[in-house]
Amino acid sequence: MRAQFTDTQIAQILTDFQLADIDETTKAILGFAVKVTKAAPSITPADLDHLRSYGLTDEALFAIVEIVGFFNYVNRIADAFGIELDDFLEQRRDFNESNG
């Protein structure tokens, strides 16, 4: 199931997801995503158990790490070549909205 966020929630998440008006499971996932991005070698079994306590399966944990890793990979390529993904994604969103 895909989470749906309001524009206000998205702005809050971008500002400080810990203070955002979102559920605790999502906050835990986002916190884990930050840790995978900034300090993957420091992930411990306790980090995984913490997410499992929210009902997440090992398959879900793998998917989270896989998605975070993919986004980090793409961002590093974009950074290396000076590609502004925000502009590209904004244009794609505008195109989809006008053709949707």
Image: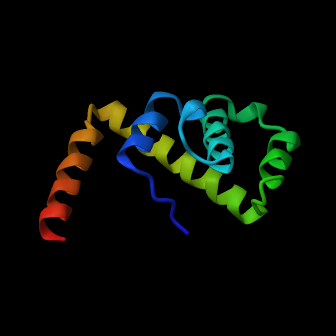
Residue drawn at point x = 55 percent, y = 53 percent:
67
- The image quadrant where one finds the N terminus is bottom right
Of 73 and 67, the residue lying toward us: 67
Q: Quadrant of residue 59?
A: bottom right
Position of 56 with respect to 63 (left or right) is right
Q: Quadrant of residue 83?
A: top left
Position of 19 with respect to 39 (left or right) is left
Q: In the image, residue 40 lies at what x, y percent? A: 69, 35
Residue drawn at point x = 81 percent, y = 54 percent:
52
Position of 62 with respect to 88 (left or right) is right
- The image quadrant where one finds the C terminus is bottom left
Residue drawn at point x = 50 percent, y = 41 percent:
72
User: For the image shown, how many numbered marks are present on the structure?
Assistant: 0
Q: In the image, residue 20 lies at what x, y percent? A: 53, 36
Q: In the image, residue 61 lies at what x, y percent? A: 71, 56
Of 17 and 85, the residue lying toward us: 17
